[in-house]
């Protein structure tokens, strides 16, 4: 696992931390080229899973650095809500007990000029068991909204601030 507060890398540095940054960037570009050629436009979902205790669920992937809201791509013939439910189940053992609420849809130019992300707010859910690490998710944990780990991505921080503060959402990630 990560350091005690969840902000640092694993003490036995494995996974993405051991892959040279240039190789990670190259792999990311190859994947985005594949999706660009295959799909033309990409659409993903993310969830701000908020507990009654004032915590938010964040995940740390094996293939990209930082802490993120759980989520993933929307497949052909899949609704946004179906994709959201699938990703929450796969990444965190979370099941919705009431519908998620759409926070906003964002153009993510950091990935490509064709990437869009729909962010949902989830307040009613159950978790069947803590998520165990696997090939995709190194760690999934709840953090107090007032004490996010240092490696929380800037986009994740911005979306959470908008949700907590009730500010307007920009068009871009």
Image: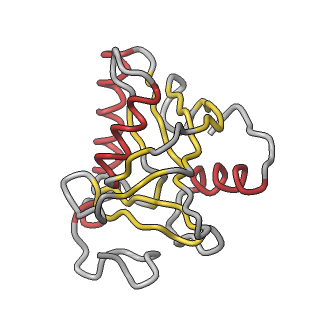
Residue at the far bottom in the pictured view: 4
Q: Position of residue 41 (x, y in %)?
A: 45, 18
* Count of marks placed on residues: 0
Residue under the point 29% across and 63% down: 129
Residue at the far front in the pictured view: 97
Q: How is the model colour-coded?
A: secondary structure
Nearer to the camera, 15 or 101: 101
Vertical comparison of 134 with 173: above or below = below
Image quadrant for the N terminus? bottom left
Nearer to the camera, 13 or 96: 96
Vertical comparison of 43 with 100: above or below = above
Residue under the point 44% across and 61% down: 66
Vertical comparison of 32 with 60: above or below = above
Residue under the point 80% across and 47% down: 167
Residue under the point 37% across and 58% down: 127
- The quadrant where residue 173 appears: top right
Q: Position of residue 70 (x, y in %)?
A: 43, 49
Nearer to the camera, 89 or 140: 89
Q: Is residue 107 left or right of residue 163?
A: left
- The quadrant where residue 118 appears: top right
Q: Position of residue 19 (x, y in %)?
A: 25, 60
């Amino acid at each position: 696992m990560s350091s005690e507060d969840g902000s640092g890398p694993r003490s036995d540095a494995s996974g993405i931390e051991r892959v040279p940054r240039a190789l990670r960037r190259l792999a990311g570009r190859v994947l985005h080229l594949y999706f660009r050629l295959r799909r033309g436009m990409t659409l993903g979902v993310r969830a701000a899973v908020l507990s009654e205790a004032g915590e938010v669920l964040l995940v740390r992937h094996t293939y990209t650095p930082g802490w993120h809201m759980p989520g993933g791509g929307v497949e052909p013939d899949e609704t946004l809500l179906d994709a959201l439910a699938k990703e929450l189940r796969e990444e965190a053992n979370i099941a919705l007990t009431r519908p998620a609420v759409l926070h906003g849809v964002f153009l993510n130019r950091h990935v490509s000029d064709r990437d869009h992300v729909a962010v949902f707010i989830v307040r009613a859910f159950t978790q069947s068991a803590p998520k165990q690490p696997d090939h995709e998710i190194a760690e999934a944990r709840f953090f107090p909204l007032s004490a996010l780990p240092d490696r929380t991505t800037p986009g994740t921080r911005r979306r959470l601030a908008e949700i907590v503060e009730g500010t307007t959402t920009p068009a871009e990630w």
